[in-house]
Amino acid sequence: MGINFRKRIRLGKFINLNVGKQSAGLSFGIPGARFTVNTSGRKQASIGIPGTGLSYTKSFGTKSKKAKAKSSSINASSDIDKQIAVNDYQNALYALSHIHNEAYDFFNFDQLPIEYVTREIGPRQKQALVAIENYKPNFFDKLFKREENEMEELQEALYQAIEEDDNNREVHRVDSELAKQLQRFEPKAMDEFIRLVGGFDCFSDDITSLSYYYKMNVDEASAIVVDVYVNLQEDIIDNVVEFDKAGKYTNKKLTKTNLNERFYAYLCSLSLGVATEACAITPLTKAYVNVYDSSVSSATGLKTERCILAGEFDEKQLMQYDYETLNPIAVIEALPVDINFTARNGFKEVKPIDFK
């Protein structure tokens, strides 16, 4: 069964353990923010605001983070507002290229009983998060510079909450008859299990325009086909929010080439995540993923639905990757994936894959 519970790992004073839905994880930093990725693929960001000693830990996905990044970048006026806007932007940008981390760990369908845990954040973690979100230093906290110590205490309480929730997390067992049907690769049983564990729902949480459909062989199922529908223009952040070399705050539109490259990174991460989820939550060893884009055509001004990625993914290959460190672009380019892309012209239509 693909359930991993990692305990707290302290790598440094300002390194935070993430608030995962199933487990803890490692954290790493980039300018203005520190990000963490856990074993279940859930991502968090600990955002530091210079001059305050404060950091806020939040989970993130493209849906909420894109809206927040857009709002904060437009309304930024003070120095702190501008720093927050840059952090929100980095946060959302990271989420766009790390959607693959949302996928489930691989279940072991050969071993009975088949067990699973849900993806929800535990009740103690929720309470600890609320405490961090609501923390506001008062006058004396600022005067005596106690903000940092108090935030560390809140984060320590968060670590404890993670451990307590994980220790008390309910492990569900699949009904024995359903488990046997899964081992026989029965499509109806696989469909029931996908619904039981909330398969593919994690992507809906993060992507503004996502819809998907899947199908399996009726007889002797050996593969699953997942058709994914997105609108790249709705999902992708089309601007850059940063401090330039002189320290000046800037908010500017991406060039067409850079925007296309951002589309490409997003598409690679999304297709890898969907393929991993499909193989992880079914006993099938192969997944075919077709991604359709319904963005407005620059040539006609009309929405067009066209397949821009068609890939074949093998479970054994996917299981070899370290999802916390991999580059989704490099993975997609090394696999049998049909994608016709150039940074200058964007995507050309490709033929979708179906059962062979």
Image (cartoon, helix red, strand yellow):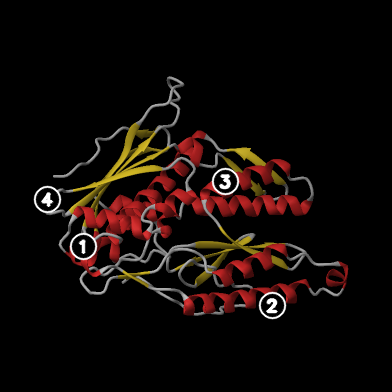
Residues at marks 4 and 3, CA–CA distance in whole angstroms: 43 Å
Looking at marks 1 and 4 on the same chain, the residue that comes earlier in the sequence is marked by 1
Residues at marks 3 and 2, CA–CA distance in whole angstroms: 30 Å
Q: Which residue is mark 3?
A: 66
Looking at marks 3 and 2 on the same chain, the residue that comes earlier in the sequence is marked by 3
Query: Label 4 is placed on what type of residue?
Result: Asp
Q: Which residue is mark 4?
A: 219
Q: Secondary structure at mark 4?
A: loop
Can you say whether 140 is above or below 79 in the image?
A: below
Residues at marks 3 and 1, CA–CA distance in whole angstroms: 38 Å
Q: Which residue is mark 2?
A: 153
Looking at marks 3 and 1 on the same chain, the residue that comes earlier in the sequence is marked by 3
Q: Tell me the quadrant of the picture where the C terminus can be found.
A: top left
Q: Which residue is mark 1?
A: 182
Q: Tags 2 and 4 in contact by the CB under 8 Å rule?
A: no
What x and y, as percent, mark residue 202? 43, 55
Closest to the observer, 296 or 19 = 19
Q: Tell me the quadrant of the picture where the N terminus can be found.
A: bottom left
Residues at marks 1 and 4, CA–CA distance in whole angstroms: 13 Å
Query: Label 1 is placed on what type of residue?
Result: Leu
Q: Residue furthest top?
A: 300
What x and y, as percent, mark residue 152? 68, 75
What x and y, as percent, mark residue 224? 23, 50
Query: Label 2 is placed on what type of residue?
Result: Glu
Query: Label 3 is placed on what type of residue?
Result: Lys
Looking at marks 2 and 4 on the same chain, the residue that comes earlier in the sequence is marked by 2
Q: Tags 3 and 2 in contact by the CB under 8 Å rule?
A: no
Label 4 Cα crowd, 10 Å radius (few <14 / some 14-19 / many 20+): few
Label 2 Cα crowd, 10 Å radius (few <14 / some 14-19 / many 20+): few
Label 1 Cα crowd, 10 Å radius (few <14 / some 14-19 / many 20+): many
